[in-house]
Amino acid sequence: MILRPRAEDIAVIGYYLSRIILGLGLTMLLPLGCAFLCGERGPFLDFLITVEITFVSGLLMMQVCRAVYESGKKKASAYEKSIDSIDPNWMHGMIMVALSWLAAMILGAIPLWLSGHWNSFLDACFDSMSGFATTGLSLAQDLDHLSLTHNLWRHFTMFIGGQGIVVVALSFFVKGFSGAFRMYVGEARDERILPNVINTVRFIWEVSFTYLALGTAALWAVGMKNGMEPGRALFHGACIFMAAFDTGGFAPQSQNMLYYHNYGMEIITAVLMVLGAVNFRLHYHLWTGNRRELLRNIEMRVLFVSILVTFIVTAVGLKTGGSSYASGGFPVLFRKGFYQLLSGHTGTGFMTVYAEQVGKEWSDLALVGMICAMALGGAVSSTTGGIKMLRIGIIAEAFVQDIKKVIFPSRAMVEQKFHHIKEVFLEDKTVRAALMVTLAYIILYGIGALAGMLCGFGFIPSLFESTSAAANVGLSCGITSVGMPAALKVVYIFQMWAGRLEFIAVFTLAGFLLAAIKGK
Amino acid sequence: MLRTLTVFFLFSAALAVSCRGACAGPETVSSSALFTDPGLYDGRTISFEGEVIGDIMKQGRYAWININDGRSAIGVFTAAENVAGLSAGGYKRQGDIVRVSGEFHRACHRHGGDMDIHAGSVTVIIKSAAREELICPAAKKMAVLLAGAICLLLISMLYGRLRKKR
């Protein structure tokens, strides 16, 4: 029998969701300040309205949920604590996370829609989810005339989403929030770096801000050397950093990274993309001087092999498929092929080629290489999407273990272990969890591909675009455009959301809604 | 005689058409055409028109500009002297509308495989101008109304807390 959720459960979820919404409202003060400083009156008004709507909805939700909870408390003695001090359980935490990402998408889309650069609110929601989920697919119109404020917001959503919306909210509301870990896990961060989740969140910010300063400075210097004005080079440097380190893939101009025509820019962003694809737990060990971990860690080893193999497939596809890069020799093939591949594998989505070129000039073999790279993704507890290297490593170890069991005498005890921060013995439950998530991703990639084909696109382009959306990559072969069917836009939004949260929070929300409808 | 006159007339017409083509300069191509069939224009001298957007990136004797024809932007590599005095477009400004003539590269070997145009000439067709910022009066009213709503909510929350304390 399915039990219908109690009003008090909904009140607790709504109450903490309102706090996350208020936290999101505070982050919008940054673009508001930017608009004021840059003298962009229209964008200032867009963001003022959005901040106000965010605060009104957050405060209103807080009041209503508090009132509902208090009225329930009077009826049942089970609710002894006040709503402020209640400890959200696993269900509360997961649903809060799933809903907070949807709320962020809607609220984050308001200033984009008000700017007039997005054809509809759905298009603005698409870009907003793409930003928060660090995907990078975009439906923006006339991006080259977009204000600095809106451009900053687009990239800032990636910075927020990359660390995690709940991580941001936890940073604002630290006191009295013991259910933090449940929400932290809901955002697909299943590894605590430090024993305390708040310290973990602080470490994530410390890493992010340090790299923000270093990365922006490097990109700023290269931008100025490239002939850009200092102010604009700084702005572009900060935006590109946020999109690279958070493996997002937005860029301030419509040509994406091709705009700069600069090798130095490509090298720096390649380094940042790889740093973004590394587990924050591994960052911690590197920061504390344990550099050997970089070579021993299963995720880094699998990532290296995976990049190598998928690049070989892509390069052979480009060389033999009659691509225009083949005639330029290996340097051209490497610069174009490897950059797109690294961008796809790390889930970033930066492009130094046009989407139309990928769709028309890249052979099926090259596209398959790219699809595999995008589908696999980076490390767990990083800002990348996709199946992730740890799971691939675990599945590979399980295969090795099974083969050993067949080869070795039946009485032999076969134990398999791998190195991930420490030596870990392979257990069936670990393999099962890895396989479940992998299967869920494959189904998600398939759903998007099927939707693309139903809309009249070919199999390989549909699978390419679907994998790009679900693995939060952002590379496009030309399907993502303003003119694509609204249903396909909705499917891609769902894929970006489910892919970023790694399903558990989404499944919990689905179960909760089912219980609300069918429960007794 | 009639046959000679006809041949002479046809020859003159053909000569006139070919001369007109030669005087008009290279063919003006849109970005759509370049993306649809890049192989057709690869290595050929073309003319491309559009707005200079973003930045004028001077690097010594050469410079990069990006030109948007309304559908897509394409990188143009040219001598620095050709971009002197150009204004690039952005949020507050419509950039110069220019016509560039030069060699189109589907995947330029000199520039790491970028699709670009190596332009010999850059001609300004329309000078840049400031873009007007349109602000909706209803948006201002909405901002004031929402500010009032926030104040009311904060007052009610404060009142609720005070009542609870008493």
Image (tube, rainbow, N blue to C red):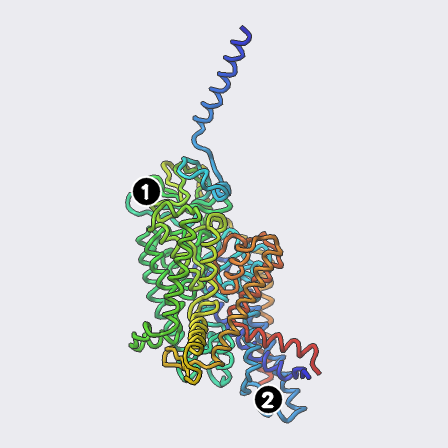
Instruction: Tell me: residue A216, above or below residue A7.
Output: above
Quarter of the image for residue B22 reads top left
Instruction: Find the residue positioned furthest to the front.
Output: A409
Q: Secondary structure at mark 1?
A: helix
Residue assigned mark 1: B80
At 61% from the left edge and 80% from the top edge, which residue is drawn? A63
Measuring from the top left, give residue B162's x and y in whole percent: 58, 86
Question: The N terminus of chain A lies in which quarter of the figure?
Answer: bottom right
Give the alpha-carbon distance from disc 1 to disc 2, as whole Å. 72 Å
Among the 4 quarters of the image, the one containing residue A244 = bottom left
Is there any visible trace of residue A462 in the rendered image? yes
Is A309 on the left or on the right of A440, as rendered?
left
Residue drawn at (37%, 81%), measured in percent from left and top?
Answer: A423
Q: Residues within 10 Å of mark 1 (few under 14, many from 20)?
A: some
- Residue drawn at x 64%, y 89% as measured from the top left: A73
Residue A372 image point, x, y percent: 46, 62
Q: Where's the C terminus of chain A, which quadrant?
A: bottom right
Q: Amino acid at mark 1?
A: Ala
Q: Chain of mark 2?
A: B
Between discs 1 and 2, the one toward the N terminus: 1
| Front residue of this view, candidates A424 and A168 | A424
Residue at numbered disc 2: B164
Query: From the viewer's perspective, is residue A111 above or below residue B21?
Result: below
Discs 1/2, front? 1
Q: Is residue B111 above or below residue B28?
A: below
